[in-house]
Amino acid sequence: METQLKKGVLELCVMSVLEQHDCYGYELVNTISKKIAIAEGTIYPLLRRLKNDGYVETYLQESTGGPPRKYYKLTDRGRKMNKELKEEWDTFFKNVNDLLKGLHNEQE
Amino acid sequence: MNKNEFIKKLKHGLSGLPEDEVVDIVSDYEDHFIAGASEGRTESEIASGLGDPNQIARQMTASNIIKKAEKNISFVNISRAIFATAGLGFINLVFVIWPYLAIVGFILGLLATGIGIISVGVVTVMISIFSLFNPDLVGHYVNLGLYPAAGLFMGISASTFGLLFIIGWGYLVKWFYILTVKYLKLNVKIITGEKK
C-alpha cells in the first residue's frame, strides 16, 4: 500500500521539482530520494515517459570537471499538467485528512 | 554490485529494444554513476540506491512493447504486450488472465458462428441453383418442403446475414483490442508511478 502510494505521487514530485528549476538526472533523483525512500532507478523510466508525452524536454550543458550533463526542463504543457495534478493532490489530501480527523474524533 | 555489473544486467534486460534507445537509456544510468562518484559515493552504494536493473529493464520494455501493439495491430504484438506486462509481476494481471482468455474464446466462437452461417447460406444457394438446372432433383426438394426459388432466397439471406455478422465481429475485435491496450497501459502506469 505504502509503495503504491509513493509511486502514485512520484510524477507530481518530479514535475514539481522541475518547476522550480531545471535539473540533471542525478540531481533530480537525489532531491527526491532524500524525501521519499524509493528505488532511485525507477525515476528514469518515468522521466523518459514524461519526455515522450511532451511534458519535459532535455538539453545538454557543460559541467565542471566531467562530461556534459543532460538537463530536464518542464515544457509549457508540463507546467499545465503539473498545475492540474497539484490541484488534484491538494483536494485529495484535504479530503483524506478531513476523514482521518473525523475518525479520530469518533474514537475519542 | 558494481557499475559494470549493473550496466551489463540492464543492457541484457533491454535487448528487445531498438539499439539507439538502449544506448540512450544506458547513458542515463552511466551519467548517474559518474555524478554519484563525483560526490564521493561508491559504485555499490549508487547501484543499490538505483534498485534492481532487471526490474528497471522490464519497466522500460513493457511500455515499449505496448506502444508497438498500439501502433501495429496484430495478434502477436498484443500477446507480447500482455506477457511483458504480466512479467512486471503485477498481481492484477494474474487474476485477469483467465476471464480474459474466456472472452477471447467467446470472440473466436462468434467468428466460427459467422463463418458457419455464411457457409450454410452459400451451400444452400449452390444446391438451389444446381437443382434449378436439374429438374430431376426438384422432386426431392418438393418432398422436403423446399422449392429451389425459396432455397435461393433463404440461402442469399443467410449469406448476407452472416456477412453482416462478420463485419460486426470486426468492430467488436477492434474495440476489444483498444480496450486491452488501455488496460495494459494502466497497469504499467500504476507500476511505474505514472498517474493519469
Image (tube, coloured by chain):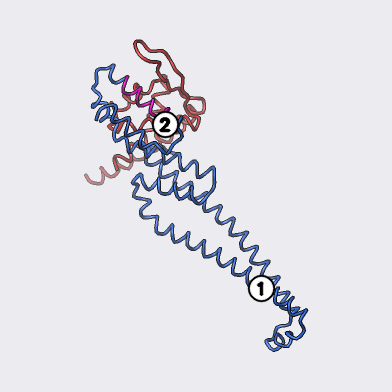
**In percent of the image, x 49 and y 41: which residue is there?**
B67
Look at the image and tell me whether residue A85 can be seen. Answer: yes
- The answer to whether A29 is drawn above or below residue B80 in the figure is above
| Quadrant position of the N terminus of chain B in the picture | top left
Q: Secondary structure at mark 1?
A: helix
* Residue placed most toward the observer, B12 or A98: B12
Q: Position of residue A8 (x, y in %)?
A: 37, 38
Q: Which mark is residue B162?
A: none
Q: Secondary structure at mark 2?
A: helix
- The answer to whether B131 is drawn above or below residue A5 in the figure is below
Instruction: Tell me which amino acid carries mark 1.
Output: Val
* Part of the protein shown in magenta: B21-34
**In percent of the image, x 32 and y 34: which residue is there?**
B9
Name which quarter of the figure residue B151 lies in.
Answer: bottom right
Instruction: Tell me which amino acid carries mark 2.
Output: Val
Q: Position of residue A31 (x, y in %)?
A: 32, 24
Query: Magenta stretch: residue B102 in it?
Result: no
In terms of secondary structure, what is the magenta stretch mainly? helix
CA distance separating discs 1 and 2: 56 Å
Colour used to depict chain B in the structure image: blue
**In the picture, which chain is red?**
A
The chain to which mark 1 is attached is B
Determine which residue is flagged by label 1.
Answer: B123
The chain to which mark 2 is attached is B
Determine which residue is flagged by label 2.
Answer: B22
Q: Position of residue A43 (x, y in %)?
A: 36, 31
Name which quarter of the figure residue B35 lies in.
Answer: top left
**In percent of the image, x 40 and y 33: which residue is there?**
A46
